Image (tube, rainbow, N blue to C red):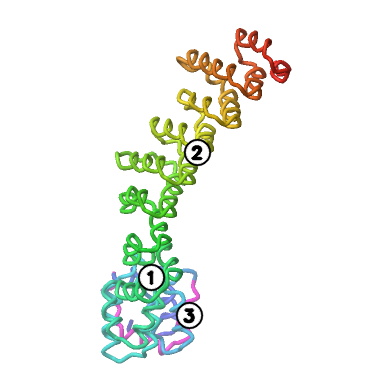
Amino acid sequence: LGNEDEAFFLKFACRRNWRGWHYTSGGIPTDSLDGLFVRYPSIARVALGTSNPSSLLIWKLTRHEDPGVAEHAWKQFQFSWNFPEEVALEDYQRLRRENFRVSWFENLARKEKLPHELHGPLWNQGGTVRQALFENPRPIPKVAYELLDTLTVEELIPYVAEKRSEVLVKAAIRHPDPRLRAIVAGFPGKPFSTLRRRFARDPDPLVRSAVADYYLSTTINYPGRHYNETLSELTADPDPAIRLKICRDHRLKPDDVAALLNDPVPEVAIKTLRSLPWNWRIALPLFSVADAAIRREAASIVLGNREGIIYEPDSKPFLREFEGLLIRDPDPGVRSLLAADPWTSPRTCWSLMEDDSPEVRRAL
């Protein structure tokens, strides 16, 4: 960098591989670099306007003496996986020793994904710098603990929903407000998957409903005992609204489906059969319930799938019992559905021709 020609420096400042050049050259002396940008302030603006300025270059320009350049640089700068954190720490320590302007440290405190090494020093600066940490969209742990004590639940919800802070997410798991627990219950992956069975037993239906919503939102077949046991917990939930949700899950075990088809709330049983019609073998109890409307709907669902059922192995005994239940049903509406179905056996049709109800005979 001994050449201080402006054209040379402009070409250097706009290099796309500026960060790589920094390392392969053994490092750029900070004083030389800063001095060149002070000498040629217009180049700082040009460098920031290139299609892909280096993050390291932008970082250096955040402390430019021209407020416009510095502001533009702060807007563009983001901490990322490929940014050398040791550079940030070294520059921070040097600028602290030099009593650099406070606004630079305030802007740094507001940046997302702050390197962990800067958390303590920025907090310990106190004053407006510490206050700026509270404006960071992803608060550091010290700030998060303060937020837990000061923010309302409504204010905490976006922090937890967007997983801005691990501290706040962990606190939400045991938070007394069910809205926060419900948010965590719907997070995918670990460690939340290991907590889902616990959430399925939560005393508040909002949280248990969130678990059901999560399972219905994914088509993944998770292995393991805990997953199946969590689904079983939901199928036996005391809230029928939750059973109405989970009965649509195609991964339910046969025992759980059978329990839902025998649910004390007929709407749950019908929705189970409508959502999982391939479980017709265990649907016969639905044709013995007291509500004729439920029996009619159940008959309609099974009859609508009968063309496929007849080709299933061992379907004949089921169909004989099924037709026997329908032909003996006291409701003519149920018998009419059987009469109108083209797959009804000839023997059953002969019996229906002698039915007492004109509605049934007309349906043949």
Where disc 2 sits, the SS reads: loop
Query: Which label's residue is closer to the chain start, 2 or 1?
Result: 1
Which mark is nearer the camera, 2 or 1? Answer: 2
x 44%, y 54%: residue: 206
Q: Magenta span covers which residues?
A: 24-50
Which residue is the site of mark 1? 138
The type of residue carrying mark 1 is Arg
Q: Is residue 195 visible?
A: yes
**Mark 3 highlights which residue?**
72
Q: Residue 265 bears which disc, if any?
A: 2
Amino acid type at circle 3 is: His
Q: Which is more N-terminal, label 2 or label 3?
A: 3
Q: In the rendering, which numbered label is found on residue 148? A: none
Residue 140 falls left or right of residue 330:
left
Picture quadrant of residue 106: bottom left
Is residue 68 found inside the magenta-colored segment of the image?
no
Q: Cα distance, mark 2 to mark 1?
A: 46 Å
The image shows residue 341, relative to residue 122, as above or below, that is: above
